[in-house]
Image: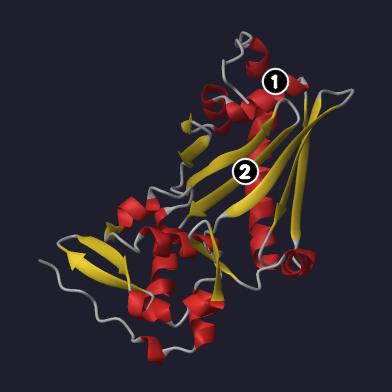
Amino acid sequence: MGTPKAPRSAGDGSAQTLIDALSSPIRREIVWMVWDAELAAGDIAAAFDVTAGTISSHLAVLRDAGLVIQRRDGNFRRYRADRTAMEAVLPLLGSSDEKWTIADDIPERTLANAAIQPWVNVMVEVPLSQDAAFEAFVDPETFSAFLGVPVSIDDGRFSTELEWGTKVRGAYEVVVPPELIALRWDFEDQAVPVPGRQLEGYLRFRPTAYGCRVEVHQAAEDRTQAEFLSVAWALVFGRLAEYAASGSALRRSPRRKRSGSS
């Protein structure tokens, strides 16, 4: 049997510390998941479209705030909610479908935060039709071919590992063929100074006289992250451009529409 790691008592942290720990939708969801059941870190991570490293960071914040208790069970770490600590926070939280939301998390606050966020805008023009360019990002075979590494896409969730070890995973939240893909994604790379987070991006595909212009628009947390994301997207678009210029995409036979695709 493993022994629980001694948590901080609720009195060790201010109410603001607890509120800050619950300011993330992912962390609120984690607390909900472990409210009635003790779960291993891997089981928690499997429920989200973010990397294991990002989930570990969220669990550390909750543990340091005293909101979850960690127990070692052999090589596994298991987590459960500390209900005593939550008693200090519940009066400050609203309720929505029996889950907790920050009471002052209003649209005006979200808009104010978005107004000061740096945005990443990267684009490339490729000699492909709008349909073919769009297909390159939703068909795993084509995505793998132009990116140069295996890409898995299953039920709207995608994942890959680049040749230098960076792991990427995420989900397509909105797919509007052949014009728009809204996605949430995350990355994990020990050598990158920017920590992985659940990132939001919008891929747009616009027909041009030359072929198709592919654009990405993505909010970043700060300028450092914006610079990294600009380089990352430039790499992806650069490989797409090389693939399109080689004629490989044009030689591929048209794919039948998949039933049930959105």
Circle 1 sits on which residue?
Answer: 132
The foreground one among 212 and 256 is 256
Horizontal relation, residue 71 to residue 242: left or right: left
Spot occupied by residue 96 in the image (x, y as percentages of width and height): 55, 60
Q: Front-most of 92 and 33?
A: 92
The answer to whether 230 appears left or right of 68 in the picture is right
Q: Quadrant of the C terminus?
A: top right
Front residue of 112 and 138? 112
Identify which amino acid the numbered label 1 is placed on: Ala
Q: Secondary structure at mark 1?
A: helix
- Residue at image position (53%, 34%) is 156
Above/below status of 86 relative to 126: below
Amino acid type of the residue that numbered disc 2 sits on in the rendered structure: Leu
Q: Which mark is residue 183?
A: 2
Of 227 and 39, the residue lying toward us: 39
Label 2 to label 1, Cα distance in Å?
19 Å
Q: Which colour assignment does the render follow?
A: secondary structure
> Dot 2: few (<14), some (14–19), or many (≥20) neighbours within 10 Å?
many
Q: Is residue 245 visible?
A: no
Mark positioned earlier in the residue sequence (2 or 1): 1
| 10 Å crowding of disc 1: few (<14), some (14-19), many (20+) | many
Q: Is residue 124 above or below residue 31?
A: above
Kindly identify the residue that appears in the image at 40 percent across and 55 percent down. 52
How far from the left and from the top, in percent, is residue 159? 47, 39
Compared with residue 244, is residue 163 higher up or lower down, i.e. above or below?
A: below
